[in-house]
Amino acid sequence: MEKRTTILDFQAKCDKGEKLVVVTAYDYPMALAVDAAGVDAILVGDSLSTTMLGRPSTLSATMDEMIHHTKAVARAVKQALVIGDMPFLSYQLGLEDALENAGAFLSEAGAQAVKLEWCPQAPEVTSFLVENGVPVMGHVGFTPQHVHQWGGYHQQGKDKAGATRLLQQAKTLEKAGAFAVVLELVPPVIAQKISQSLKVPTIGIGAGPHCDGQVQVFHDMMGLLPDFHPKHAKAYLHLHEEIKKAVQQYAQEVRSGKFQPGS
């Protein structure tokens, strides 16, 4: 049996200066491939609301949906650390509710940790969850669950006050017991300063090359959404076009009477 990555391995790699690789996944075959590629962690992101379910934002993701998809991912994974993303209002309404929801990711869905976005309750919730045996990854900078507050998808921490705020938030989450902190849409120079100020790993997305690791959305990397090309992503394949061509070839063979299974 392959050794599963733990939060201690995460920290040990960071301490050695090894970059951490994180990718999202949302179902069994996707997780099989990502895990086999040797990533350090798989995030079952609430981004499934947009990537898998076609919604305009992450705000509609529910606990039932997150647990359902996390179960599928966890069944496939043999090596990577699986992190479940706490959806909107699953941790902001009280400590007991937050623990029940976070606990479901571990006890029911098979994750080894959860991620939660910065909010006024985040430090207290993080501390409470960690004290009760739930590893927590924090998230500062642009927080998608606050997209309406931010007025869209905008870089955060561009001025001195904003940069100071992000640094304080990241330090606060570290002090509360977070084992890592995601930095999203943060100026690279600020992300570098935060990374140098924390002992726990920083995981960047649209935050430059100086973070301790990077996270990318699977669908962005694979080119599965042809009309969505975020600046912070890099497409390594263009699967939408390849899938379309394959289905068109199949349709042509069926319509011409040439289709033969297994040929």
Image (spheres, grey):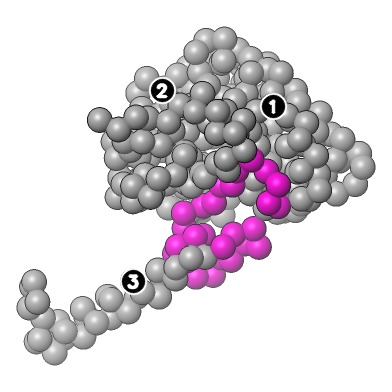
Q: Which numbered dot is residue 243?
A: 3
Check the picture and name the quadrant holding the C terminus: bottom left
Taking depth in this image into account, of 154 and 150 the one nearest to the observer is: 154
Question: What's under tag 3, amino acid-wise?
Answer: Ile
Lower position in the chain sequence, tag 1 or tag 3: 1
Viewer can see residue 254: yes
- Give me the residue at 57% from left, 40% from top: 18
Q: Which numbered dot is residue 199?
A: 1
Residues drawn in magenta:
208-234
Q: CA distance from mark 2 to mark 3?
A: 35 Å
Lower position in the chain sequence, tag 2 or tag 3: 2
Classify 10 Å Cα crowding around label 2: few (below 14), some (14-19), many (20 and above): many
Q: CA distance from mark 1 to mark 2?
A: 25 Å
Task: Check if mark 1's residue and mark 3's residue have beta carbons within 8 Å.
Answer: no
Residue 38 location (% of width, % of height): 40, 45
Check the picture and name the quadrant holding the N terminus: top left
Residue 257 location (% of width, % of height): 9, 87
Q: Nearer the viewer, mark 1 or mark 2?
A: 1
Q: CA distance from mark 1 to mark 3?
A: 43 Å
247 in relation to 79, above or below: below
Taking depth in this image into account, of 86 and 73 the one nearest to the observer is: 73
Residue 239 location (% of width, % of height): 40, 68
